[in-house]
Image: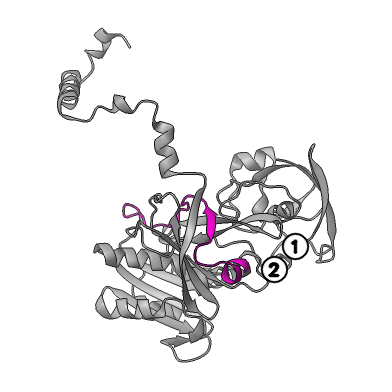
Amino acid sequence: MNSEILKQLDDYDNVINEREVLKRYGYDYRLDRGLEKKYLERLHPRHITTKIIDIIEETPSTKTLRLASVEKYLPPFQAGQYISVNVDIDGIRTSRPYSISSSPDETAYYDITIRRVEGGFVSHYLLDSTKIGNTLQISSPAGNFIHNPIIHSNKLVFIAGGSGITPFKSMIQHAVNTGISRDIWLIYGNKNSEEIVFDDYFTMVAKRYPTIRYIQVLEEGKAHYNGYITAKIIKEVVGDSSNKTFFVCGPQGLYKHILKELQTLQLKPKQIRMEMYGVPPDVFKQNGWPEDVNSDSKFKITIKNKKEFTVTAGEPLLNSMEKNGVIVPSLCRSGECSLCRVKLISGKVYQPEGVKLRQADRRFGYIHSCAAFPITDCEIML
């Protein structure tokens, strides 16, 4: 822009004076020109090689793996975020996301807490085949299941089921470690007392800090409440819900149940935060699944100009591609981040409720392969 025109702008003289002061006393960022890529790679590396420095037994079915960077540096993260762990199992290259259960202020390592999943692939491998000293390749932290003090209340209700407790461990520990002012109600549901993860920690924190309340809900055994987490329990524990933000994390079954319960509390949509937690384990029971497609149905998948293979109904397209040696970048594996999207040239796929496709993706035929289930022969383009 012409310098004479610039001089006519409001506050021109003040801006010039500020520039001179910054040149004299501030940091000259011109020295960093050309280093943007280096800084971004440090904060958001595509891959990080870590070493398992400890394995902590949490419950009979759950362990925490403590991961330290081989290069002695881990990017910062926000409580509630996750990392994706890449593994090679029997010749299959795949990945799974795990919430970081340690606090962001503990910068030397990430903790990931893994519960054995019935029929699981990666969870069995990580729990049974890894040892202290093994290396694991992970992604940098990602995810939006975080507390934003500008948008969200400082009165927080955490509702967790099973291994969905992991992001809340990070959030609560960070609040305790740093003295952040938070009123927290943690309502944690499990089948029985043997399955409660971090029980000793939450019990200790609730005793020492009056602003943190810990409520157990068990299907079996002695607890604060028995059965399932309900609106009645939430109302008894929390009281007035109108000034609170609710965070929910757990298996798919928890979400359907809790959403119905929360509706009776007349919460505003902005008061509820739901973490994506994988695709439905039994997609055949989902609303909208075609009646003529069952577990014996098979379909041909053609990857344009690359290869063909046959898949069985009920398995996400991403999993099928990985089993057939086709590697697509992935991160959340819950239909949210869009990193694994591919173009559907022909055929049909079923996508469960909650898959966050952009409007542009729908318009131009892109799908999230981690949450797309073929229901006909399909041709796709990577």
Which quarter shows the C terminus? top right
Please state the horizontal and vertical placement of residue 86, each as a whole percent of the image: 58, 55
Disc 1: which residue: 314
For the magenta stretch, what is the residue range?
125-151
Q: Is residue 82 above or below residue 328?
A: below
Local packing at callout 1 (Cα closer than 10 Å; few below 14, some 14-19, many 20+) is many
* Res. 205 mark: none
What residue is at 32 percent from the left and 52 percent from the top? 150
Left or right side of 137 for 372: right
Q: Main secondary structure of the magenta part?
A: loop
Give the mark nearer the N terminus: 1 vs 2.
2
Q: Residue furthest front?
A: 133
Disc 2: which residue: 282
Q: Amino acid at mark 1?
A: Gly
- Colour theme: one colour
Q: Is residue 239 above or below residue 363?
A: below
Please state the horizontal and vertical placement of residue 336, each as a whole percent of the image: 56, 52
Left or right side of 102 for 61: right
Regarding residue 32, the answer to whether it shows in the image is yes
Regarding residue 244, the answer to whether it shows in the image is no
Q: Are marks 1 and 2 in contact (CB under 8 Å)?
A: yes
Q: Nearer the viewer, residue 34 or 220?
A: 34
Q: Amino acid at mark 2?
A: Asp
Q: In the rendered structure, does residue 306 fall within the stretch colored magenta?
A: no
Q: CA distance from mark 1 to mark 2?
A: 7 Å
Residue 214: quarter of image: bottom left
Please state the horizontal and vertical placement of residue 322, each as a whole percent of the image: 70, 53
Which quarter shows the N terminus? top left
Please state the horizontal and vertical placement of residue 239, each as a whole percent of the image: 34, 76
